[in-house]
Amino acid sequence: MEKVNIDIVRQNVPQFFYKRFEMSLKAIGYFIIPIDYGYAYLLRTVHTKWSTNIPGEPVSGLVFEAKYIQQHASRELQNKNYRQDLISTPGTAGKTTDGTGTFVQGVFSAPSPAPFDAKGFNINFSANPVKNNIVLNYFYQRREALDLRINFDLVNTRVGQYVDVLLCGYYIPDLTLGEWKK
Amino acid sequence: MNLFSNLINPDRIMKLQNVQYSEKLLLSDTVPESGQQLAKVNISSLGHFYCQFMTGSFETLAETTDPPGIIDDGVSHLRAKMSDGSNQRQLFNDYIPLDLFLSPGRVVSRRDNNLTDLTKTAPSNSLFYPQPFVYLFPVNSEILFDVKNDSDVELKYEILFHGIRLPIASRDNLKKI
């Protein structure tokens, strides 16, 4: 074990950005978040959860595909849309049932309310746990907005879906700036 | 730390443990039904706390009329926003559903009136990987956790911060390590 270096002012700061998208068949989601002055942002992992709520269609395991793009650099961070469940859990959030209740990915979905809670936002998800994530390490420069465009491509559905996206990363202080110098 | 890749020096490790040692801080609270509550855990005056991971679990209860009572519906009702109490820095940009970042996540509660019906109640989730959360919380500060509950039943949650305690006094006296 190495000795921990204490640097409260100039340390990296964990920063989670959360957004809920309501999408149609093909849609684009925009993350436009101003990065704090003096920091860059390192995006480590993306956690996603989406609904599989298709009336009259008892399909589970529905997925959506996404493509991450850095707007500021016009940089596509992958060559094609890929299935979101290939890089992160918990993934699907269950589906509504016909009133009998089913188990979806190990999580019980009660008849009433079903995975979508009838109260609150009306769009709560069943509580699938986060099991694993692939580290992305996308880096965003300082002095700009975190301007990320995500192309959603819903597979095998006809209705709008809700998608929760959580970006987990760190603010990295730019030590070349005068405000951080000792 | 990979124990088997380095020669273990007991003397050095004992000295090092005087200035930093593993510690876990628990944050536990019950959020009233359809309400919001701010919980906090004190870092104390002992020293800084270098957080590395967090794990957590929460209840997923709701009220039902048929059958009357409380049922574990497996729905995530809690959303939270974390901040550093020393400088009020927001570590989350919005209220994030707890199931999106906590492992093991959902636990079955004994308050579920239908708990005896094992055909309808799924088991609690089990621990997978803890959520990395590397941050130095300063001495005498607080970890603030503001939680909203949109269930009509009060819900309990627990979060465990895994990290390293850095005692101030020891580090000042034992600089040569």
Image (cartoon, rainbow, N blue to C red):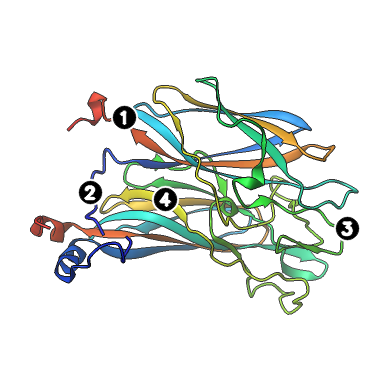
Give residue A129's position: percent from left, percent from top.
Answer: 60, 58
Q: Would you name the residue on which mark 4 appears?
A: B133
Q: Residue at x 58, y 50 (%)?
A: B100
Q: CA distance from mark 4 to mark 1?
A: 20 Å
Q: Are marks 4 and 2 in contact (CB under 8 Å)?
A: no
Pick the residue in front: B62 or B126.
B126
Q: Residue at x 65, y 57 (%)?
A: A127
Q: Is residue B38 left or right of residue B32?
A: left
Residue B45 seen by the camera: no
Amino acid identity at mark 2? Asn
Which residue has dot 2 on it?
Answer: A5
Quadrant hosting residue A66 = top right
Distance in Å between CA atoms under marks 3 and 1:
54 Å
Residue A150 at x, y = what percent? 62, 31
The circle drawn on residue A174 is 1
The outermost residue toward the bottom is B116
Q: Residues within 10 Å of mark 2 (few under 14, many from 20)?
A: few
Distance Cα–Cα, label 4 vs label 2 = 17 Å
| Drawn side of residue B138 relative to residue A115, left or right | left
Q: Label 4, secondary structure: give it.
A: strand
| 3 vs 2, front mark | 2
Subunit bearing disc 2: A
Of pointers 1 and 2, the one earlier in the residue sequence: 2
Going from the N terminus, do you reach mark 3 or mark 1 first? 3
